[in-house]
Image (tube, coloured by chain):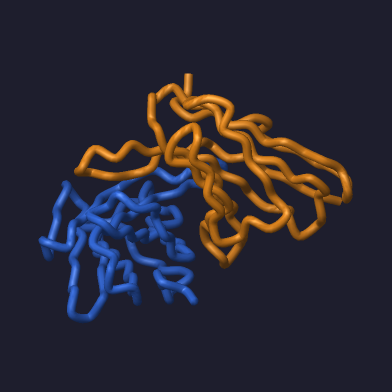
Amino acid sequence: DQQVKQNSPSLSVQEGRISILNCDYTNSMFDYFLWYKKYPAEGPTFLISISSIKDKNEDGRFTVFLNKSAKHLSLHIVPSQPGDSAVYFCAASGQGGSEKLVFGKGTKLTVNP
Amino acid sequence: DADVTQTPRNRITKTGKRIMLECSQTKGHDRMYWYRQDPGLGLRLIYYSFDVKDINKGEISDGYSVSRQAQAKFSLSLESAIPNQTALYFCATSHWTGANYGYTFGSGTRLTVV
């Protein structure tokens, strides 16, 4: 049973526009959420996180929104740049983030110049 | 030097062979993990260790074993490799600080079983 779902395998946007990547989770015990970015031939790297006590966290061009009632989070990238082209993984953890992470299947973002 | 180093980076092996993938870290983290990535399946946890004396199975541990030789070293073994173990393998580390919890990943080992 997949506890973290990224239903869009791929997303294509134009440079300068907004990219919105979505993630749903089923485990109500999850209370800490992260986004990772992965380039080919490299390991995933941490991008941004959010605790369940918040509904928004912002870091530069990246903003993560959390809707606990819908068990849904999203990553907004504004403005999108060609260098943002990568696979983005959503991840979740319980116990305030102390438990191991559960990852989604990833969404491949392509930002076209 | 990388914080999390995986060796080898690439490996081709034959069905039935035993193979070991190694991971070492310089971050001083107590927790270490092994994941595999397959196209369309994301990152799936194989084994994890929260300290040197703690080893736990992940969601896909069958056919794999691990050894935590020291805080800095965590190796993954395939006792008898089979073709469906062809994948990209990642080691990761973490340290629970009570905030900003996250993993540091190695660059991966691409394993092909023929």
User: Residue at left 44%, top 46%?
Assistant: A44
Q: Quadrant of residue A90?
A: bottom left
The picture places residue A67, in percent across and down from the top left corner, at 18, 73
The picture places residue B1, in percent across and down from the top left corner, at 48, 18
Left or right for B99, reference B62: left
A84 to B1, vertically: above or below: below
Q: Quadrant of residue A51?
A: bottom left
Left or right for B41, reference B100: right
The picture places residue A68, in percent across and down from the top left corner, at 19, 74
Q: Which residue of the protein is positioned furthest toward the bottom in this rendering?
A: A70
User: Residue at left 52%, top 49%?
Assistant: B56
Total numbered circles: 0
The chain assigned the colour orange in the figure is B
A64 to A81, vertically: above or below: below
Q: Which residue of the protein is positioned furthest toward the top in this rendering?
A: B1
Visible residue check, residue A107: no
Left or right for B47, reference B95: right
The picture places residue B24, in percent across and down from the top left corner, at 54, 27
Looking at this view, is B111 or B101 the one in front? B101
User: Residue at left 63%, top 41%?
Assistant: B66
Left or right for B56, reference A70: right
Q: Quadrant of residue A3?
A: bottom left
Q: Colour of chain A?
A: blue
Visible residue check, residue A99: yes
User: Residue at left 14%, top 53%?
Assistant: A58
